[in-house]
Image (cartoon, rainbow, N blue to C red):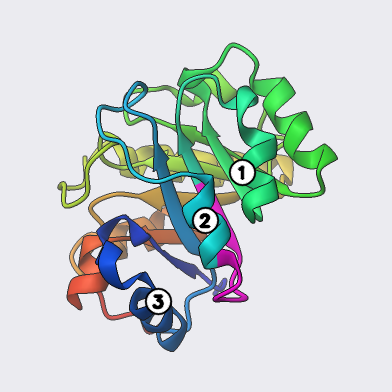
Amino acid sequence: MKQVMLSPSILSADFYNLSVALKQIEDEKASLIHIDVMDGHFVPPITYGQPVIKSLRSRTSLPFDVHLMVEKPESCIASFIEAGADFVTFHCEATNHADLCVNLIHKAGKKAGIALCPATPLSFVEHLLPLVDLVLVMTVNPGWGGQKLIPYTVNKVRSLADIQKEKGLGYKISVDGGVNEQTLAPLLDAGVDIVVSGSSFFSGKLKWTK
């Protein structure tokens, strides 16, 4: 059985005590830290930017997966890498230059991820699948924590896993949104590699034993 990685999202942490959140993540033996960047345009909320990421970088050795929910990510990829991103995951719906984004990330020596909103078909990114290191399936509509998982997104994970196996591709399949004790099992069965969890992780409702 393959090793599935936990990537807690600090979107659901207490922003006043982010150092405490980092310790909790490390204590739970997580593999990555998921950092949601929202610009108020691609999604309505605004979260945090490069200065916050830079300040956290020296506090932990865990890799940062910076999830850019921003318009025209090609304009800011370099600055997020400079701030400390190890993975940069951008939305295919937010740019006309997805191939350029992947190249910018790889040229900087970092891992490139592509994210899809729930209703975006896999065909939208089929040409990028051999190029990226991570595919993030949004299992809720992006922008807010605490939502319920959208059931049909599990089939997208399964389809990605089938493509991954059939074509011998090396991307990791990540899921973000609504992951809890009830929804985790079908996602694992579908073939997920990385589980992003925010509100369930920080509330203690997701007990990680993988």
53, above or below 182, in the image: above
Three-letter code for the amino acid on which mark 1 is drawn: Phe
Three-letter code for the amino acid on which mark 2 is drawn: Ile
Based on the displayed image, in which of its 4 quarters is residue 80 positioned?
top right
Residue at the image position 79 percent from the left and 40 percent from the top: 106
Q: How many marks?
A: 3
Q: Position of 45 compared to 169: left or right?
A: left
x, y (%) of residue 3?
A: 55, 73
- Taking the image as drawn, is residue 127 in sight? no
The quadrant of the picture occupied by the N terminus is bottom right
Which residue reaches farthest bottom? 27
Label placed on residue 53: 2
| Circle 2 SS class | helix
x, y (%) of residue 109?
A: 82, 49
Label placed on residue 80: 1
Mark 2 touches mark 1? (CB < 8 Å): yes
24, above or below 37, in the image: below
Q: CA distance from mark 2 to mark 1?
A: 8 Å
Within 10 Å of disc 2 (Cα), the crowding (few <14, some 14-19, many 20+) is many
Comes first in the chain, label 3 or label 1 = 3
Front residue of this view, candidates 11 and 83: 83
Residue at the image position 54 percent from the left and 19 percent from the top: 72
Q: Position of 143 compared to 169: left or right?
A: left
**Residue of label 3:** 19
- Taking the image as drawn, is residue 70 in sight? yes
Front residue of this view, candidates 134 and 83: 83
Comes first in the chain, label 2 or label 3 = 3
Stretch in magenta: 57-66
73, above or below 17, in the image: above
